[in-house]
Amino acid sequence: MRYHLRIARTRPQGSVDTHSTILNAPTIEAAIDRSIEVVDSFLDGRPGVATLTSPYRGLIWAHRRNLPAPSWP
């Protein structure tokens, strides 16, 4: 099955780097495990976010690293 992984990380100057890739995995669990590896490598300790989606199931997994909590009104 095909999954879409999107990652955004902050740059020291305040802008954002983005990365997007398609993952092929036999199960959702395998896709999440592979996503964790890719995200850890891409973020390399920097703050960022990642989402894993499926065209059939929508959002499957989301991850935030070293970002402030969202503010609620």
Image (cartoon, rainbow, N blue to C red):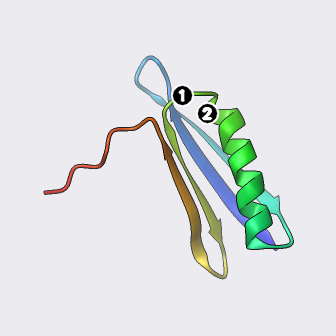
* Horizontal and vertical percent position of residue 29: 74, 67
The residue closer to the viewer here, 17 or 66, is 66
Give the percent coordinates (x, y) of residue 51. 57, 57
Tell me the residue that label 1 is attached to.
46
**Which residue appears at 19% of the width and 56% of the height?**
72
The quadrant in which the N terminus is found is bottom right
Above or below for 73 versus 2: above
Q: Describe residue 44's horizontal placement relative to residue 47 as left or right.
A: right
Q: Is residue 52 left or right of residue 8?
A: right
Quarter occupied by the C terminus = bottom left
Q: Are marks 1 and 2 in contact (CB under 8 Å)?
A: yes
What kind of element bears circle 1? loop
Q: Quadrant of residue 26?
A: bottom right
Q: Secondary structure at mark 2?
A: helix
Residue 12 or 39: which is nearer the viewer? 39
The amino acid pointed to by label 1 is Arg
Q: Amino acid at mark 2?
A: Leu
Q: Residue furthest left?
A: 73
Image position of 8 with respect to 31: above or below: above
Q: Residue at x 40, y 38 (%)?
A: 67
Please tell me whether residue 40 is drawn above or below residue 36 in the rendered image: above
Q: Which residue is at a point 22% across and 49% down the rendered structure image?
A: 71
For the view shown, which residue lies furthest in the bottom direction? Answer: 56
Q: Residue at x 43, y 17 (%)?
A: 13
- Camera-side residue: 61 or 3? 61
Tell me if 26 is positioned left or right of 13 in this view: right
Residue at the top extreme of this rendering: 13
Q: Quadrant of residue 15?
A: top left
Spot occupied by residue 49 in the image (x, y as percentages of width and height): 51, 45
Specify few, some or many for label 1: CA neighbours under 10 Å numbering under 14, 14-19, or 20 or more. Answer: some
Q: Which dot marks residue 43?
A: 2
